[in-house]
Structure formats: C-alpha cells, structure tokens
Image (spheres, rainbow, N blue to C red):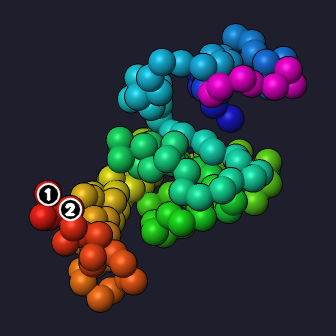
Amino acid sequence: QRPDAHFYIVGMNPAQTVRALAGSHVIVTGTVPDVRPYLQHAAAVVAPLRLARGIQNKILEAMAMAKAVVVSSAATSGVTAASGVDFETAVDAEDFCRKVVAVLQPEVGRKMGQHARARIVADYNWTRNLSAFEKLLEPGTCSGAGRAARSLDAH
C-alpha cells in the first residue's frame, strides 16, 4: 500500500531471520551509536515486541520525539499512555500492517505524535518521577530510610 516507504530495523544483534529481510526497502542496521537520527527521520515507529520486561525506553524515546508509534501489547507494560490516542496497539501481523498504514497518513501520524509527546512531557518528567523517591526518604516512611537520609545530611 506504500511502495515508497522504507522500513528500518534498528537494534543490537539482529537474528539471521531478521537480517535476511534486508532489501531495497528494508534496511537492517544492527547496532547504531545513537538511535535518535533514525527516530528523527521516521514517519512512524514500530515495536512488535513479543516479550518485554519493564518500561520500554525505545517506545518512550519515540513518543518524546512526537512520533506515531505502533506496538504490541507486551511493549506497553508500565507505559501510562492511552492506546488509540498516544500510540496504537496491534495484535498480529495484519493488524500491525493496517495500523502502520493508518498512522503513515500525515494528519493521523502528526496528531498521534503530538498526543504522544504531550503524554511524555506530562507523565515522564523529573519533578513527577522524583517525588515518589522523596517520599521514601522522609523520616518514618520506610524503616531505616529516614535515618540514612539524616546520616547523609550530617556529613
């Protein structure tokens, strides 16, 4: 549906089956020193992770750069964003294709990217994320944590 599209597979140690996908419109980079130039030029970012543990920084990085992102449900663990607004979730290969083609429409991708960036700015900032740690350091909050903090202040 998009014969002009180029698909970059960026990441460390791609399997032989992934490297075999390389062709005129599929570029397999392997390890890169900095993923941001690839994200900057991307119209959309795809993360079809089958297994994912913890928050996937690659998704947050793409969202922070205002990119439309299509992910598997496994990749959304711990992400506070809303599927269908801040990113799209796909369940199988056909669904990925359909949703990627949809977000490649300039207005759809731009709007989703704006929502994604706003979500990152609102939910993943230093003030919001460090406030939970500050509470842990308050005396009496956690056994020993308050004493440790006071001890550090004394030095």
| Quarter of the image where one finds residue 149 | bottom left
Tag 1 and tag 2, C-beta contact below 8 Å: yes
Relative depth, front residue between 149 and 82: 149
Q: Is residue 12 magenta?
A: yes
Examine the rendered structure and indicate whether residue 42 appears above or below residue 89.
above
| Residue 61 position within the rendered picture, expressed as x and y whole percent measured from the top left | 42, 43
At x 33%, y 75%, the residue is 145
At x 45%, y 50%, the residue is 60
Magenta-colored segment: predominant secondary structure: loop
Please give the residue where the numbered disc 1 appears in the rendered image. Answer: 155
- Left or right of 144, for residue 80: right
Amino acid tagged 2: Leu
- SS assignment at label 2: helix
Examine the rendered structure and indicate whether residue 18 appears above or below residue 142.
above
- SS assignment at label 1: loop
Examine the rendered structure and indicate whether residue 49 appears above or below residue 18.
below
Does the rendering let one see residue 123? yes
**Circle 2 residues within 10 Å: few <14, some 14–19, many ≥20:** few
Please give the residue where the numbered disc 2 appears in the rendered image. Answer: 152
**Circle 1 residues within 10 Å: few <14, some 14–19, many ≥20:** few
| Residue 120 position within the rendered picture, expressed as x and y whole percent measured from the top left | 34, 57
At x 77%, y 51%, the residue is 50
Tell me where the magenta segment starts and ends, as one range. 11-17
| Quarter of the image where one finds residue 47 | top right
Relative depth, front residue between 43 and 33: 33
Q: Is residue 39 magenta?
A: no
Tag shown at residue 33: none
Amino acid tagged 1: His
